[in-house]
Amino acid sequence: MQNNKLQPKLSISIITYNHELFIEECLESLIHEKCNFNFEIVIGEDYSTDRTKEIIQEYERRYPDIIVPIYQTKNVGWQQNLIDVINRCSGEYIAHLDGDDAVLSGKLQKQVDFLDHHKECSMVFHNMKFIGENIVQDSYNNPLEESTCIMGINDFVSQGLAHWCNSSKVYRKSSLNEIEYLKNLHCIGDQYLHLQSANKGAIGYISEVLGLYRKHENGFATLNKQKDRIACALNDLVLTYSHAYVYGVKKELVDRQFAFIYFDVACQYLVLKDYKNFKLYIEKSHENNIFFNKKHKLCFTLREMPVVLHGLKLLNTYLNNLRGKHSI
């Protein structure tokens, strides 16, 4: 922990809402990080209805040189809350951490050192371990096997923006200049910010597990699977990946990601037995004549037989659960 009366080199951006069960663990994991630079924790508390604000106030009292709180006077939503937090960050670098996640020892120093030594990079990610109920112990966020790698925007997009965990990134504040665009998004904002930073420089990746990503029933990852959020998430992803065309990413790579997005949406509707929307989006997923795996091809081929596909999906989920794996 450093004394942050001096100009911080790193700002840690946190947005939080109703995280009373998790926010203390999140802050404790940061407060005791040992770094050779000063850092600040800028935390946007979005008018929670639980004790989240009280907990933050206690940390503000104990660590006034580090904690920079923003107490919203009404619930402004994650978009405005995140914009306010980013605008308040004064460091050269920004690390993002969701209020229900936590860091592991050495994360901040290793990522700042990486960006210091790789001036060509605008952002660096690391591997994450999932925590929460019904999580396999050795389940991690990113499947890349390289110990360290640096990639350009084309390779970054081809990996799939969803693979890069929001709570694992540190980026140069100068790489963001269009954050107000977040107001056009409603469910998913991290992938847009990742793409925007990737447009400003190369992307670094450290395979070491340096953080904990919590999956629980109130998290966005779960909410986005509910029927009333599918269309919202789809809208945000289409807007985000449309920027990839503008940023000069190879068309075939973007088209492939759109195929995946529409296939994923089709599968969600299939599980919910909304066969009309399943058929609509499985056909959209093949508009550019792309099949990215055998499951995609099978679903498209049997698109007129959704009841059969629904049964196969349930069987696949059951078998994966028996093996202790997560269904795709």
Image (cartoon, helix red, strand yellow):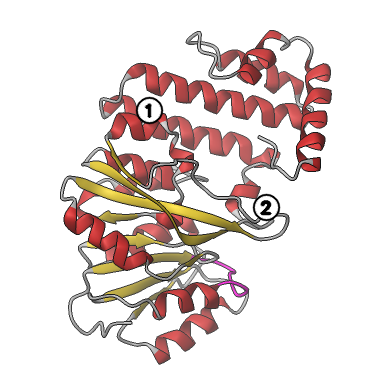
Report if residue 20 lies within the magenta region: yes
Residue 60 vertical placement versus 25 (above, below): below
Question: Which percent across, then down, holds residue 168?
Answer: 42, 56
Q: What kind of residue is marked 1? A: Ser
Report if residue 133 lies within the magenta region: no
Q: Which residue is mark 1?
A: 242
Q: Quadrant of residue 195?
A: top left
Q: Is label 1 in a helix, a strand or a loop? A: helix
Q: What is the span of residues highlighted in magenta in the rendered image?
A: 16-22
Inspect this view and state whether residue 79 appears: no
**Label 2: how many Cα within 10 Å (few below 14, some 14–19, many 20+):** some
Q: Which mark is residue 258?
A: none
Q: Residue at x 66, y 61 (%)?
A: 132
Q: Is label 2 in a helix, a strand or a loop? A: loop
Say whether residue 71 is left or right of residue 193: right
Question: Which percent across, then down, holds residue 135?
Answer: 68, 54
Inspect this view and state whether residue 97 appears: yes
Q: What kind of residue is marked 2? A: Val
Question: Which percent across, then down, holds residue 181?
Answer: 34, 44
**Label 1: how many Cα within 10 Å (few below 14, some 14–19, many 20+):** some
Q: Which residue is mark 2?
A: 136
Q: Quadrant of the C terminus?
A: top right
Q: Residue at x 53, y 25 (%)?
A: 260
Q: Residue at x 43, y 38 (%)?
A: 161
Return the disc, 2 or 1, that comes first in the chain's sequence.
Answer: 2
